């Protein structure tokens, strides 16, 4: 009888341990995905720049201007790709980041300026490539103004149009930066990855 009780207790302990281990592994995967999920160059050695990769949300390279752009939890950093020296650090004063969903994104336009999307609010910030001046745009989600969510992916189409994917729900939008308004795009099928957009996302 005692042996049966002891075996039963051991089985319960084993099952609980396996469940806790599985939960821990899932949380670790989520954390890893939310931190360097969309690195444009996964083979890039951030350590050679003196950067801890755990601090970084997104990395974008601009070979034409020999620059490396990094989005962290509270700022954007620009480096010279040749010398690996930091050119500029731009603080994001009204920045908000939500956990456990698609991370914020950073995209570079044809002029080399950076667009940064909050994943918690429909907000896009623009950093000028020359002056590094920061402008914030509150984006109106046309027809879905009641939605309180941000963007988890940004990408430019072949025609230069900016596309943004919501951080939850896989809703795709075209964003008009001149008017700060976004229009919902009907998708025949969801993107290949719910946190990323193919480049370009739509032929134009």
Image: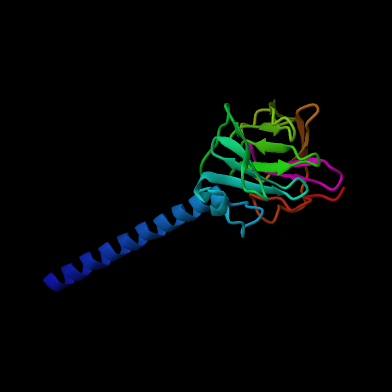
In the foreground, 98 or 22 = 98
| 204 displayed left or right of 140 | right
Whether residue 151 appears in magenta in the rendering, the answer is yes
Please, what is the dominant secondary structure of the magenta stretch? strand
Q: Does 29 sit above or below residue 152?
A: below
Question: Is residue 166 in view?
Answer: no
Q: What x and y, as percent, mark residue 168?
A: 61, 43
For the rendered model, the colour scheme is rainbow
In the foreground, 17 or 131 = 131
Q: What x and y, as percent, mark residue 102?
A: 59, 45
Question: Is residue 45 in view?
Answer: yes
In the foreground, 17 or 44 = 44
Q: What x and y, as percent, mark residue 20?
A: 35, 57
Q: What x and y, as percent, mark residue 39?
A: 62, 52
Q: Quadrant of the N terminus?
A: bottom left
Q: Residue at x 58, y 56 (%)?
A: 45
Extreme-left residue of the structure: 2
| 197 displayed left or right of 37 | right
Whether residue 60 appears in magenta in the rendering, the answer is no
Identify the image quadrant of residue 183. top right
User: Which range of residues does the magenta coloring cover?
Assistant: 150-164
Extreme-front residue of the structure: 83
For the image, the number of numbered tags is 0
Q: Residue at x 57, y 49 (%)?
A: 49
Identify the image quadrant of residue 10. bottom left
In the foreground, 146 or 182 = 182
């Amino acid at each position: 009888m005692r042996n049966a009780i002891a075996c039963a207790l051991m089985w319960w302990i084993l099952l609980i341990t396996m469940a806790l281990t599985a939960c821990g592994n899932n949380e670790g995967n989520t954390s890893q995905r939310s931190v360097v999920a969309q690195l444009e160059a996964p083979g890039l050695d951030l350590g050679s720049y003196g950067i801890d990769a755990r601090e970084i949300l997104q990395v974008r390279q601009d070979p034409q201007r020999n620059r490396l752009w990094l989005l962290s939890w509270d700022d954007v950093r620009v480096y010279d790709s040749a010398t690996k020296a930091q050119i500029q650090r731009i603080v994001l004063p009204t920045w908000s980041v939500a956990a456990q969903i698609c991370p914020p994104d950073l995209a570079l336009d044809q002029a080399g300026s950076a667009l940064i999307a909050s994943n918690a609010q429909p907000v896009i910030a623009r950093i000028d490539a020359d002056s590094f001046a920061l402008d914030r745009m509150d984006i109106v989600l046309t027809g879905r103004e009641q939605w309180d969510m941000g963007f988890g992916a940004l990408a430019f189409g072949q025609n230069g149009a900016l596309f943004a994917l919501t951080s939850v729900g896989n809703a795709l939008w075209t964003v008009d930066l001149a008017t700060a308004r976004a229009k919902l795009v009907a998708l025949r099928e969801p993107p290949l990855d719910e946190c990323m957009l193919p480049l370009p996302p739509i032929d134009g």
